[in-house]
Amino acid sequence: MSSKTKIVVLHMKEVIYTGIFVVLAIVLAVLMFIMFGSKKNDEAANVSNPRFHAGVYNTSVTLNDNTFDVEVTVDADHINAISLVNLSETTTAMYPLMEPTLEDLASQIYTTQSTEGITYSEDNKYTSMLLLDAINSALDKAEIK
């Protein structure tokens, strides 16, 4: 019976470091799976159920015999651009809050991708309401029903 006993010496510091690296590798693998795995499913769901017909949609607005258009550009799932077109210098001079109000509303709409819950100040309440109605009208034309 000649068996040689082998003694293995492990330093506690190395065991702890190895354990920490193994745990971090597992956490990283789980996070990557969650991030990249669920994104593909979300994109597939969005492609199969688009919200809008892609295109450019206009709504005319008339203020004291001055007519201009609110133009909304959408793709299948996003509101991409909102702008005023055919806005004359007379209308700009008579209603100076029109363009800054639209820029404020558009930035909120781009962020939320909806016209629900949009906030505006009391100073330009009626201008905001007029523009939101025009934007909603253009989005109604774009919606898939």
Image (cartoon, rainbow, N blue to C red):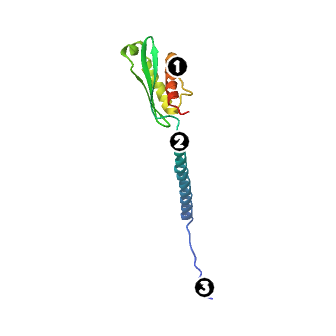
First reached walking from the N terminus: tag 2 or tag 3: 3
Question: Which amino acid does the dot numbered 2 rest on?
Answer: Asn
Question: Which amino acid does the dot numbered 1 rest on?
Answer: Met
In 3D space, how far apart are the residues under numbered discs 3 and 1 (Cα atoms)?
91 Å
Q: Which residue is mark 1?
A: 129
Task: Name the residue rendered at 51%, 24% in the picture.
Answer: 137
Depicted 28 relative to depicted 122: above or below: below
First reached walking from the N terminus: tag 3 or tag 1: 3
How many tags in the picture? Answer: 3
Q: Quadrant of the C terminus?
A: top right
Q: Residues within 10 Å of mark 1 (few under 14, many from 20)?
A: few
In 3D space, how far apart are the residues under numbered discs 1 and 2 (Cα atoms)?
30 Å
Secondary element at tag 2: helix
Of all residues shown, which one is farthest toward the right?
A: 1
Q: Which residue is mark 3?
A: 3
Q: Residues within 10 Å of mark 3 (few under 14, many from 20)?
A: few
Residue 50 in percent (x, y) is at 52, 38
